[in-house]
Image: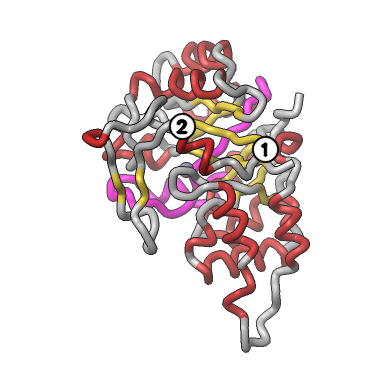
Amino acid sequence: MIVDVHSHTPTHRDAVPPGERRVYSNWRTDRDVTTTNSWADYDREMAAADVTIVFNIAVDDPEPMTGLPYLPERTNDATAEFVAADPARRIGFLSVNPLWDNVFEETERCRELGLRGVKLGPNYQDFDPLGERALAFYAHCEQEGLPILFHAGASPMRHAPLRYTHPLVFDEVALRFPELRMVLAHMGHPWSTDTVVTIRKHPHVYADVSSIYLRPWVCYQSLLAAHEWGCTDKLLLGSDFPIAGTAEAMAGIRRVNDILDGTALPRVPLEEVERIIHADALGALGLDR
Ligand SMILES: [Zn+2]
């Protein structure tokens, strides 16, 4: 089974009206990314996955904060409606800001809507991931068995503090909440070696490989580090739709050794790449029940 653990909720149920189309140029260096998309666009791009995890990020003003245009008051309802339309293939994560007064009420409301995990981007949401309110929220997630997928590593958004995205921040979280299941997005690129030593030591901390292949050297050194530290089994497939689709994400990491032609550099074993693609992500995150 192929599980794509990282995708963003499509912005439109039906075809995007031409006047509402948005394009963002900073996600990829090779092409622009269309950040408005329909449910059908999503299904086409994610067709290679048997199951996908999908979410928005709870911010007051999505487009300047995250680069993704969606209605802030519909952050979680849009995801819940999308998942309810094809619940066998889609798992929805909720998003909240731990600084909200109603964070626990909103979390409970979203769980009643069927959302089964949490997406947080402390850099986009401007909360300290080691602050008191954040720690109280992680304690709740640990107790309730809610996995959290954290944005980790680089972001092109100017206002988003990089210090909130470093993988070693999440070592601190895991030390305090050892049973909390976490995914560090993008292997925390470019700090993927720091991600590797973090996921290696914590049984319930994983990383997704979304977007790493967009930079061939980052992809190579990230996957080689995971191989050399013996933790490719802690890596999960992700596409980061709309930045890419599942098929492109799979093809991207399968090309990891292509830059090595004519060199004596060590190769990433391709059977380990296949194990990432076919990883039991739902079991890892406690979502198989
Ligand atoms: Zn993402």
The CA distance from mark 2 to mark 1 is 17 Å
Residue 175 higher or lower than 139, as above or below: below
Label 2: how many Cα within 10 Å (few below 14, some 14–19, many 20+): many
Span colored in magenta: 143-170
User: Residue 144: which disc?
Assistant: none
Q: Residue drawn at (32%, 55%), measured in percent from left and top?
A: 26
125 and 211: which one is in front? 211
Image quadrant occupied by the C terminus: top right
Q: Which residue is mark 2?
A: 9
Q: Mark 2 or 1 closer to N-term?
A: 2
Find numbered disc 2 in the image and state the secondary structure of the residue it sits on.
loop
Asked if the magenta segment contains residue 153, the reply would be yes
Image quadrant occupied by the N terminus: top right
Q: Is residue 201 left or right of residue 148?
A: right
Q: Which residue is mark 1?
A: 50
218 and 88: which one is in front? 88
Mark 1: which amino acid?
A: Asp
